Amino acid sequence: MDIKKLVRNKILKLIPYKSARKIGGTGDVWLNANESPYNNFFFLKNNYFNRYPEPQSYLILKRYVNYLNNSKISSKNLLISRGSDEAIDLLIRAFCDPNKDKIMFFPPTYGMYHISSKIIGIKSIIITTFKNGNLNFKEIKKNIDYVKLIFLCRPNNPTGKILSKKNVLHLLKCINKRSLLIVDEAYIEFIFDKNLLKYLYLYPNLIILRTMSKAFSLAGLRCGFIIANSFIIKILLKIIAPYPLSSPVIDIVSQALLKKNIVFMRNKVLIINSNRIWLINFLKKFFFVKKIFNSSANYLLVCFYYSNFIFKYLWDNGIILRNQNKNYFLKNCIRISIGTKLECLKLIMKLKNLSYNLKIRYCCVK
Ligand SMILES: *Cc1c(COP(=O)(O)O)cnc(C)c1O
């Protein structure tokens, strides 16, 4: 029997998402998945597992509403998902009809919008940004027909750019309520006052994605949120799996959303942001660093001379980064997640060794 013949053709041809974990590597400095380098130590409060968990945890909803601190947002505006990756999948499945509807996104950006749409069989309209990361409104308008969902990553992964509020509002005007705009705020905690929560009330077609994976240091748990008007949430609740969140996830996420742990998170954000500035100041002294992109998140996109060589050298020396060389417009670029000060220092030391070994001029001597 030829089982291959039974597989959907699109899935046979699919090139799956290459997560940082799948790519692998060995070493002790992991700066490739934009995780937090800081763990916080939680203990399970409940350890009975014979019962199914709550489909949507009341406690998490209540505490996340408190965390959002916006008088117009209630638990009716929230859906808890298995990370934002599930949120992306749910939105496409709920709103797009294969063979008819399309999604749109703006590379270079996060890869899962495209991959989820391919898995479900939805066509993607790809409108690359300008070199400076701004949107090409002319092309967006021209291609908007049959686009149900638009994904905007803000701050953008992997460039670190945060599109101005003015531009987001202009985008909302351009699409004129014909499509839903999904703003992926996975990194918004790193740029405190720039979220778009207050526009949810004005624009019923605006949806915000959040995650516990980045600033909250809980990538291993798999938990995220969709914030939207209550009708959209009701629709999504129809299609989400019956028990998406396991009991330990509910237990620990609800602890992570206690006031004292939010303070812990905010302190870590401050430290990571200051590590980022510290790292930039070192990196820009290497003559093989061509460009460092402005970043509003816990990673830096850096354009190198000899980027593949440098990536491989660091990889072989146990410093694992994310190569962006194949991404749109990002030839010779490497994304570096911001680690602890020590991890950043180890990276700098290896780069110094490299420049010394190659007897290439290191421009740091002052
Ligand atoms: C990391 C990341 C996600 C995925 O988050 P999970 O909640 O861990 O699934 C979503 N969007 C962007 C832009 C990310 O960088």
Image (cartoon, helix red, strand yellow):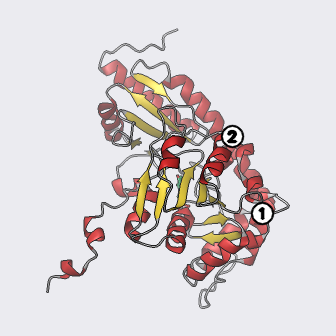
Q: Nearer the viewer, residue 78 or 258?
A: 78
Q: CA distance from mark 2 to mark 1?
A: 33 Å
What numbered label is drawn on residue 71?
none
Q: Furthest residue to the right?
A: 71
Q: Quadrant of residue 115?
A: bottom left
Whether residue 161 appears in this view of the structure is yes
- In the rendered view, does 353 fall on the left or right side of 340? left
Q: Amino acid at mark 1?
A: Leu
Q: Are marks 2 and 1 in contact (CB under 8 Å)?
A: no
Q: Amino acid at mark 2?
A: Lys
Where residue 200 sits: x, y (%)?
Answer: 73, 58
- In the rendered view, does 15 fall on the left or right side of 163? left
User: Please, is residue 162 above or below residue 96 in the view?
Assistant: above
Q: Which residue is mark 1?
A: 258
Specify few, some or many for label 1: CA neighbours under 10 Å numbering under 14, 14-19, or 20 or more: some
Q: Residue at x 57, y 31 (%)?
A: 294
Specify few, some or many for label 2: CA neighbours under 10 Å numbering under 14, 14-19, or 20 or more: few
What numbered label is drawn on residue 166?
2
User: Please, is residue 78 above or below residue 212 in the view?
Assistant: below
Where residue 64 sits: x, y (%)?
Answer: 74, 64
Q: Residue at x 30, y 70 (%)?
A: 11
Q: Residue at x 51, y 54 (%)?
A: 144
